[in-house]
Image: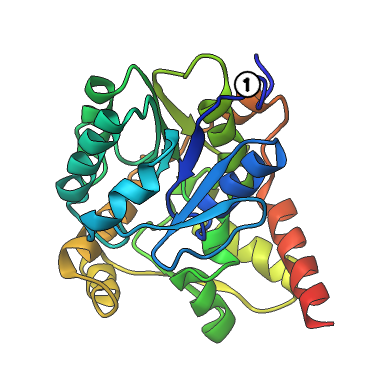
Amino acid sequence: MTAPGAALAPGATLVLGATGTTGSRVASRLAGLGHRVKAASRRATPVDGTEAVRFDWHDPATYEGALSGADRVYLLAPVDSATPAEVMLPFLEQARASGLRRAVLLSSSAIPAGGPAVGQVHQALPGLFDEWAVLRPSWFMQNFTGDHMHARSIREEGVIRTAAGEGRVAFVDADDIAAVAVHALTDVRAPGTDLVITGPEALSHADVAAFLADVTGRVVAHRPLTYEEMRDHLAASMPIEYAAMLAGLDRSNAAGAEDRTTDTVRRLTGRQPRTFRDHVTRAVRRAVRGAV
């Protein structure tokens, strides 16, 4: 295994969604390793050690400036879109024409090549670039401790609502996803495959609630919903098509679709993925420090 950063390229790495959960971590790690990074976001928000650039999936006028000087890209789909290929594929065609040679796409362990949403982009990627990888992480641990709807309902009501029933999921820390992404972007050879990324243990949402309650000292409970109830709950804050897709993923989790672990983090980074308890403990400590 080649250490991340061993193959420093003359071109820049364009990181889309550079202010987001994984994008910010990828941009910071790359900059810390000495890579030139173009941190792209709709407001061109600076990320330490990077060049901030404006990028908006729905504004093709921002594509050229973002791509200028870049030879690789970390790809995040537009938020809340059930059909991201409609804007992503034209951008990738332009990226290839501009000289971009490596693309690393963030997808999901729940969405295979050719599947819904970003699965269509996954399917097209090998035909567009010789150097590519698709990251397919499980559900994020940060969903319960960051600014996700689950984290908000935990803080405000002490409740996690899902249609996942007792299905188990190997939740993964975004830091571990970013570490794999940096490897895929900087190693001498691109993976040329999809990488399913999980944490070290599969947990039900009731298990998650129990861990959160134990570490924080608060009452936290999982409230199971039907598919229809979850879809309608989500549709209050997003398009109905996207809500239906997310509720459908929960339903798949209830049937065991995410009850697995992989060795991807250890194999590519040389260290074990973070456990959920460790993640929550770290998050609580950071919150306490931030409040002081």
Few, some or many residues within 10 Å of mark 1 (<14, 14–19, 20+): few
Please state which amino acid type lies under the numbered disc 1: Arg
- The secondary element bearing badge 1 is classed as helix
Q: Quadrant of the C terminus?
A: bottom right
Give the residue at x 20% y 40%: 89
Q: Percent position (x, y) of residue 182?
A: 58, 34
Q: Percent position (x, y) of residue 171?
A: 54, 47
As drawn, the residue found furthest toward the bottom would be 156
Give the residue at x 24% y 56%: 61
The residue closer to the viewer here, 160 or 110, is: 110
Q: Is residue 223 left or right of residue 59?
A: right
Q: Is residue 15 left or right of residue 241?
A: right
Q: Percent position (x, y) of residue 92?
A: 25, 37
Placement of 31 over or under 2, stated as above or below: below
The residue closer to the viewer here, 218 or 34, is: 34
Q: Is residue 57 visible in this depiction of the protein?
A: no
What is the image's colouring?
rainbow
Give the residue at x 44% y 37%: 69
Q: Quadrant of the N terminus?
A: top right
Residue named by callout 1: 267
Placement of 248 over or under 108, stated as above or below: below
